[in-house]
Image: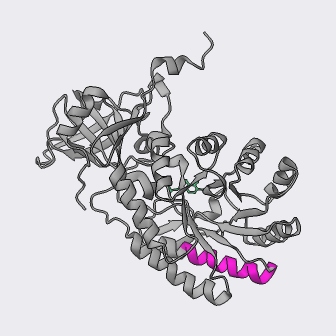
Amino acid sequence: MEKRPFVTLEMVRQIAKTYPTPFHIYDEKGIRENARKLNKAFSWNKGFKEYFAVKATPTPGILKLLREEGCGVDCSSLTELMLADRCGFSGREIMFSSNVTPAEEFVLADKLGGIINLDDISHIDFLEQTLGRIPETISCRYNPGGDFSANNQIMDKPGDAKYGFTKAQMKEGFLKLKAKGVKEFGIHSFLVSNALSNEYYPALARVLFEMAVWLKEETGVACSFINLSGGIGVNYRPEEEPNDIMAIGEGVRREFEDVLIPAGLGDAAIYTELGRFMLAPYGELVAKVVHEKKIYKDYIGLDACAVNLMRPAMYGAYHHITVLGKENAPLTETYDVTGSLCENNDKFAVDRRLPKIDIGDYVVLHDTGAHGFSMGYNYNGKLKSAELLLKENGDVEMIRRAETPEDYFATINL
Ligand SMILES: *Cc1c(COP(=O)(O)O)cnc(C)c1O
């Protein structure tokens, strides 16, 4: 599918007068429409709720609008819990899916009334010692081990992942929690990240639904919610087809009717913890071309670097690039598009076919709305950019200011 940015050259020229590049910008309309589509796709399930994975985009201006669309939040650290609290989320709107969890994080999750999703069977005793009791509602994270394949495109190795309980531990954990007085149970599993297939979620759902049936038979406990976690992918590359959330919702419904309803578990609520699917396509990193260097290859240097978007440096991830104002120009050049870090992996693109670029051009890096700004760091003393929201009425609002040198020095003893 052809990739068109949601900002134009004219818009960026206007915005840059107030907010200099680089900046991340998010599309309120796209975010809201997508959240509504997700809720519609799962409207057949009466308890359905999306808990947005805060780590993807931990920005109050974004979290608040997702809350207006009926989403809760999935937190995995102390500050994410604090952020959720400050954004007005409370009680059952908060899921806490952590691992290697510090005691203070369980204390805060419990204090806020969030649902605790345990990553390890040893955390049952740890949680009880930490709180002096066990909460009435608990979820357990399942890791089926071995290899997981949903079709020939999706493969992962849960057996190599650090997360979750084994199958035997799920039963043992449920029995132990039941004996300690837990009244309401849920299960969770996260097997594949960025799955670009409508088959992943139904296949994962089947694994979890069969687990719920087995747990009911073995322990007498009926799960009241089943959390399919994150993992629905997005089409970062123009040649990829986007996922069809309506087809995914229907696929999960088929498994629900096939596995859960006959087992008498038809009251179970479906929860999701999507991050990437909710936000990635609705965020863009806008940067300006500041240098061109010609040595053995041709390099285009941006005012953004891996500090603003780490995925290409970290995993060689593809982010599509549009040169604003040259959307229809022929792709006559081959460039490496780089940032300024003293690290040779600070490249947004390698050998990318692009139109002829001039210094001063604005470029858009697509699909940076999730795991983009949030993975930022301060290597080389580089500072994180501002985040802007393109509102439905066309106004642009700053939802996080850019860091300043004072922020960088704030934690240092001089
Ligand atoms: C990261 C994460 C998510 C979100 O993953 P996406 O790939 O962004 O959908 C959901 N749940 C947990 C526990 C996670 O760690």
Task: Compare residues 216 and 313 and report the one nearer the observer.
Answer: 216
Q: Quadrant of residue 321?
A: top left
Please say whether residue 210 is one of the residues in the magenta stretch.
yes
Q: Quadrant of the N terminus?
A: bottom left
Is 399 situated above or below 66? above
Q: Is residue 91 visible?
A: yes
Q: Position of residue 364 (x, y in %)?
A: 27, 42
Q: Which stretch is magenta?
A: 204-219
Left or right of 317 in this view: 84: right
Q: Position of residue 345 (x, y in %)?
A: 41, 37
Ligand 1 appears in which quadrant? bottom right
Left or right of 411 in this view: 21: left
Task: Compare residues 410 and 51 and report the one nearer the observer.
Answer: 51
Q: Residue at x 63, y 48 (%)?
A: 76
Left or right of 36 in this view: 127: right
Q: Residue at x 49, y 28 (%)?
A: 378
Q: Position of residue 139 (x, y in %)?
A: 71, 63
Q: Residue at x 26, y 49 (%)?
A: 6
Please say whether residue 58 is one of the residues in the magenta stretch.
no
Task: Compare residues 269 and 190 and report the one nearer the observer.
Answer: 269
Q: Position of residue 109 (x, y in %)?
A: 71, 49
Main secondary-structure element of the magenta-colored stretch: helix
Q: Residue at x 30, y 38 (%)?
A: 286
Q: Quadrant of residue 411?
A: top right
| Residue farthest along the top direction in this orientation | 414
